């Protein structure tokens, strides 16, 4: 089949394939993502109110959100939240926690080494790799700018 | 006398009969519109096993044994099994059927496997290579998601064009005579590639293949859509159905009053949140056994074309940027 016909078919398929409504999805993502952040803020304020240092408060907030997400993943509740909230549930730290916990549960049956060990980061792996790589790159640029005297 | 007709079809001089058939499905399928028609509905997705793969193997074993029993036979009387599934290296088939101790041809035709299994089984019986054979195919939602997509608990949003893999297995014992339904002909499909790369829109990947095979069936047998009471595709879903009807109209055939799709029939898309419809090897297999066969057996329908459709992709081919070609295998079933 030549490329032109393939292209025509591709365009036709686009027309007949239903898609989620983007504005509605954005609204739901805003609400769900917002609620998760409000919960985080609540934990942070609570910790600060108890007189903890700011760094420690932040760490507690992340830890509690991660724990809650993993427990909800284990009980198969988090996928329903993401089904409704889309990126609103995926982008916060809770989504990242889910993407690590889900393979751990699924691949446990393949053993601790080749199952959980090898596959726990199948989804989160790229985020970790390119996250670290990007921060290294930015660090290098920062160093070079300092070295050349552009910033002091 | 030759039994070849046209370019891609066979018309059997002594059409093999379906002597017994069985279907076993998971809980979700049991809650669908065809739920009351299946032989066995599991209480959970694991069927008492520890892994999804073992559960799918269990489905194969149960369906096979049930179909042989319903045909009034013992497993030693079956000469060959033609069976397949969706898993890498076909492990659901090999671990499921090991205890049956019957010579096996393991197949892979993606979701078209039951069409391939019935075609090869019918050819074998019609050619006098066997008195009895069994044709079967299975799929499992859990094992298929793991094989092709994400872990089950991963939180994502499925597009509306995505299908829901059927947990189930259908098995059919074929023999020379004695059944109420026969396989009078087959049309074997070609690999058809229209260049679609979206593995979450498999209806669009497979509809051109279904169109090709159905059109070829009309040509080879010199038939019109009205010569069939029903034309069932395997798992095109709503998107694929729309495309198939359009593509066939372009070729001069209107099958809108005959066409149904197993993937649309098996779930209530709204209530069960299955989006485009059911898919997987089990989809066409269990729908054929539970629903289509019954209609043929009570002669509500006289002649039906079943066209299971398969999307030929693997995780590797998809990641390497390949297209998703389709294939469709037509089997002509008639009541007798």
Image: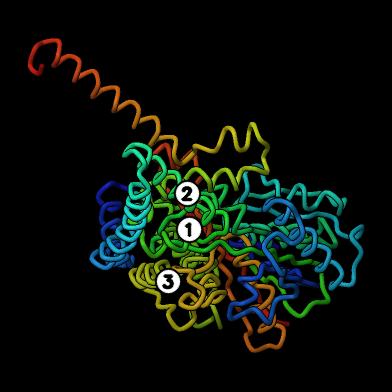
Residue at the disc numbered 2? A98
Residue at the disc numbered 1? A78
Q: Nearer the viewer, residue B123 or B28?
A: B28
Asked if residue B190 is positioned above or below residue B336 in the image, the reply reads above
Q: Residue furthest front?
A: A51
Q: Is residue B289 left or right of residue A45?
A: right
Label 3, residues with CA under 10 Å away: few <14, some 14-19, many ≥20: many
Could you tell me which secondary element the residue under label 2 belongs to?
helix
User: Label 2 lies in what chain?
Assistant: A
Q: CA distance from mark 1 to mark 2?
A: 8 Å
Q: Residue furthest left?
A: A150
Front: mark 2 or 3: 2
Residue at the disc numbered 3? B238
Q: Point out residue B284 in the picture as x, y percentages from the top left corner.
A: 60, 67
Q: Are marks 2 and 3 in contact (CB under 8 Å)?
A: no
Q: Quadrant of the C terminus of chain A?
A: top left
Same chain? Circles 1 and 3:
no
Q: Point out residue A115 in the picture as x, y percentages from the top left corner.
A: 62, 37
Front: mark 1 or 3: 1
Could you tell me which secondary element the residue under label 1 belongs to?
helix
Asked if residue A90 is positioned above or below residue B59 in the image, the reply reads above
Q: Nearer the viewer, residue A39 or A8?
A: A39
Q: Is residue A146 left or right of residue A55?
A: left
Tell me the colour scheme of the image. rainbow
**Picture quadrant of residue B36:** bottom right
Q: CA distance from mark 2 to mark 3?
A: 31 Å
Label 1, residues with CA under 10 Å away: few <14, some 14-19, many ≥20: many
User: Label 1 lies in what chain?
Assistant: A
Q: CA distance from mark 1 to mark 3?
A: 28 Å
Residue found 30% across the figure and 56% down from its top:
A10
């Amino acid at each position: 089949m030549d490329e032109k016909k393939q292209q025509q078919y591709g365009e036709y398929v686009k027309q007949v394939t239903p898609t989620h409504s983007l504005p509605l999805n954005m609204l739901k993502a805003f609400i769900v993502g917002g609620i998760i952040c409000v919960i985080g803020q609540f934990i942070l304020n609570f910790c600060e109110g108890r007189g903890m240092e700011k760094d420690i408060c932040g760490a507690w907030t992340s830890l509690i959100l991660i724990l809650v997400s993993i427990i909800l993943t284990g009980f198969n509740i988090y996928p329903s939240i993401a089904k409704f909230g889309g990126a609103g549930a995926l982008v916060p730290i809770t989504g990242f926690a889910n993407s690590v916990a889900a393979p751990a549960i699924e691949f446990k049956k393949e053993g601790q080494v080749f199952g959980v060990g090898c596959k726990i980061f199948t989804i989160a792996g790229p985020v970790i790799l390119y996250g670290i790589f990007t921060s290294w790159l930015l660090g290098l640029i920062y160093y070079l700018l300092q070295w050349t005297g552009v910033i002091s | 006398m030759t039994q070849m007709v046209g370019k891609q079809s066979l018309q059997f001089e002594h059409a093999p009969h379906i002597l017994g058939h069985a279907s076993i499905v998971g809980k979700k399928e049991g809650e669908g519109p065809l739920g009351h028609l299946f032989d066995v509905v599991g209480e959970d997705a694991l069927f008492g096993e520890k892994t999804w793969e073992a559960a799918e193997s269990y489905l194969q074993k149960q369906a096979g044994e049930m179909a042989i029993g319903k045909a009034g036979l013992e497993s030693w009387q079956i000469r060959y099994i033609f069976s397949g599934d969706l898993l890498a290296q076909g492990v659901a088939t090999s671990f499921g059927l090991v205890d049956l101790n019957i010579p096996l041809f393991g197949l892979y035709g993606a979701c078209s496997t039951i069409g391939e299994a019935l075609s090869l089984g019918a050819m074998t019986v019609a050619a006098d290579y066997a008195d009895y054979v069994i044709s079967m195919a299975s799929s499992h939602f859990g094992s298929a998601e793991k094989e092709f997509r994400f872990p089950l608990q991963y939180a994502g949003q499925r597009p509306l064009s995505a299908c829901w893999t059927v947990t189930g297995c259908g098995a059919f014992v074929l023999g020379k005579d004695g059944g109420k339904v026969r396989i009078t002909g087959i049309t074997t499909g070609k690999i058809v590639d229209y260049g679609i790369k979206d593995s979450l829109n498999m209806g669009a990947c497979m509809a051109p293949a279904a169109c090709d095979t159905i059109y070829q069936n009309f040509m080879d047998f010199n038939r019109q859509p009205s010569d069939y009471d029903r034309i069932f595709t395997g798992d095109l879903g709503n998107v694929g159905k729309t495309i198939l009807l359009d593509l066939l109209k372009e070729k001069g055939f209107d099958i809108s009053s005959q066409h149904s799709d197993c993937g649309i029939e098996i779930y209530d898309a709204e209530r069960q949140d299955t989006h485009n419809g059911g898919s997987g090897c089990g989809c066409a297999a269990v729908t054929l056994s539970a629903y289509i066969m019954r209609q043929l057996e009570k002669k509500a329908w006289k002649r039906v074309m079943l066209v299971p459709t398969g999307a030929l992709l693997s995780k590797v081919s998809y990641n390497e940027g390949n297209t998703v070609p389709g294939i469709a295998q037509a089997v002509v079933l008639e009541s007798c």
